[in-house]
Image (cartoon, grey):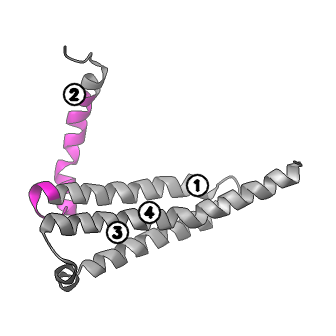
Amino acid sequence: MTAGGRGRQSKKTDALIEGAAPALLVLTLFLARFQLMRQAGLGLSQAWHLGLVYGLIQDTALCLLAWALASALGHLPGLRFRVVWIPLSVFIWLATTANVFYHEYFGSRLEAWVLRYHLHDLTDISGSAGAMGFSPWPA
């Protein structure tokens, strides 16, 4: 295969990733919304009347915004789509997952004030989590 052939293959792979990655993120966010529905014991019609569709629209819009930003910045010299997309998508997915877990344990939405209030806890637990990670397993 020639050098030009590898370049075409790389561009095809990049185009596939650029198209499939946002769709997969939207799918995982939809699954997280349906997990919230299940936790709340709601059926589809009840969730529709309570406004679940607005959350799905917000998830899709956020993914499209991240995709647009990654696509735009990915055309700058030295940046690729993946370099911008991966941190954005991981942040979006972690925020949604945190909301699902918070709702599972506390039965309410994860609000911004809760994050601000408990932000200092991360520094407190990071030391103990690191110590636990480097300690030998108990017998």
- Of 47 and 64, nearer the camera is 47
Element type at mark 1: helix
Is residue 76 in view from this perspective?
no
Q: In this picture, which residue range is highlighted in magenta?
A: 104-129
Whichever of labels 3 and 4 marks the residue nearer the N terminus, that label is 4
Is residue 14 in view from this perspective?
yes
Q: Residue 82: which numbered mark, if any?
A: 1
Q: Is residue 36 left or right of residue 89?
A: left
Classify mark 1: residues with Cα within 10 Å, few (<14), some (14-19) or many (20+). Answer: some
Classify mark 4: residues with Cα within 10 Å, few (<14), some (14-19) or many (20+). Answer: some
Instruction: State if disc 3 and disc 2 touch (CB < 8 Å).
Output: no
Q: Is residue 21 left or right of residue 126?
A: right
Which kind of residue does numbered mark 1 sit on? Arg
What is the magenta segment's predominant secondary structure?
helix
Whichever of labels 4 and 1 marks the residue nearer the N terminus, that label is 4
Residue hosting label 2: 128
Identify the residue at horizontal 19%, vertical 41% (top origin): 121
Identify the residue at horizontal 37%, vertical 71% (top origin): 59
Element type at mark 4: helix
Which kind of residue does numbered mark 2 sit on? Ser
Distance of mark 3 from mark 4, alpha carbons?
Answer: 9 Å
Residue hosting label 4: 25
- Above or below 61: residue 130: above
Q: Quadrant of the C terminus?
A: top left
